Amino acid sequence: MLTKHKGIIKMKIGQKIKEIREEKDLKQVAVLDNQGQISQIEKGVKIKRPKEATLRIIAKKLDMSFEELIEGTDWSPRDKSKGQFVISPASYEFKIDDSGFISCLNSTFPKYNKNGDLTEFCPHTGEKLIANCTNCGREIEDSDYAYCIGCGTKLTDKWAIPENLNNLITPESLTDFGFCTENLDRLMAYSSDVVVWYNTLKECTSHEDWVNKINKGWVSRIGNSFRMPRIREGKFEIDKKHELNGMLFEIQLCSKVEKKLRKTLTHLTNTEETKTSSDKIYEGLFNTMQNLINENVTTMQNASFMIASFQGKDRDAYTETNRKLIETNEKSISKLADLLKSFDPDGDHSEIEQKLKSIKSEKISETQNSDEKISEDGNSETDAAENADRNNKNAENKKDKESKNE
């Protein structure tokens, strides 16, 4: 098969490869490990102009130079300025509209710079950039691609926007000064915790190292806004990579949300000046109580989630530390609630009561979940014995009833 190139008749590169391969009596897999790819190159249908790197591999397998392989063919280097992109697996572009909706895409860059040099690493994270589909080798032709258009393979991992961050960028927080200020404070606490967890986990080299940091009280130095990363024994490297990638996504998202909230603050009317001193004190106390409630809820959720990671004395120590923290916060919450009610003894305290009920309900729910986890892990011999006694008694009662009926 011949083609006319700039007035000169030339052979297609795929046809030349096929002819030389057959002359040498070689199978396709002997020329290129990916048989599907070499088949497409030889047919010249889906891959009409293979990459130089691929052709160099083929030339070596055919025992010839790259220059000899392309000589007399229609192959030419690709235009390095148009239509080729690389995707960063760990850098993201976020957009937040006026309603607070967050959209996200991986950052993309031109495959070649103005000088024609290959762009290989992400300038923001230092991660290796993705230039080709890992399955079929097809190049990325559009910066918005999430899947390969050649075989449908996902090009990068996709992360969901965390619900707690979605809740900080609501229409209320974008239109009300008080909501915006409060959510910004919560965001900064959350962001700080994520960064500390990220750096802590990144320094760990083994599961034992990770557990030691937790048992030595490292957790107590970190706030409770962000959950503790889940690192399983025997799965350390897999879990570490997954958790670090997820936290890196959230760190970048937090930065974007922070910019949005700070920009919003500059455009909102500051109504703080119209509030009385009493109003400000009440609001400050209420926010403090709310923060303590949130801290307790997060602590209980983490405890329910993490308790299966500990055994014996370590489990007891972890449980005791969380219990003391929750009890201390509950005492403070109760005092703050009484103090808030004293501002207006005959007023409506339904909002305060609702907050107190919410943490009680959460405590009951998390306690039940924790008990279920202990039972599932086989760490509560007392519960198991009680269940066995109960089952035996039920069986005996059933037999007595059957004998009476007879």
Image (tube, rainbow, N blue to C red):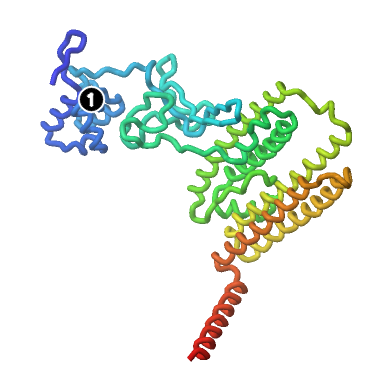
Residue at the (21%, 17%) spot, across then down: 74
Image quadrant where one finds the N terminus: top left
**Residue 206 image point, x, y percent:** 54, 51
Foreground residue among 226 and 213: 226
User: Where residue 51 sits: x, y (%)?
Assistant: 30, 25
- Mark 1 closeness class: few <14, some 14–19, many ≥20 residues within 10 Å: some
In terms of image quadrants, where is residue 376?
A: bottom right
Give coordinates of residue 278: x percent, y percent: 88, 36
Q: Residue furthest top?
A: 7
Residue 6 image-quadrant placement: top left
Q: Quick check: 334 left or right of 388?
A: right
Residue 215, x across and y down, in percent: 66, 56
- Vertical arrangement, residue 355 with respect to residue 126, above or below: below
Q: Is residue 101 above or below residue 380?
A: above
* 380 sits left or right of 91 in the view: right
Q: Which residue is mark 1?
A: 65
Which residue is found at the position 76% from the left and 45% from the top?
A: 351
| Amino acid type assigned to the residue bearing label 1 in the image | Ser
- Which residue corresponds to the image point at 41% horizontal and 20% vertical from the top-left? 112
- Quarter of the figure with residue 275: top right
Depicted 173 relative to depicted 77: above or below: below
Q: Is residue 41 above or below residue 308?
A: above
Q: Secondary structure at mark 1?
A: loop
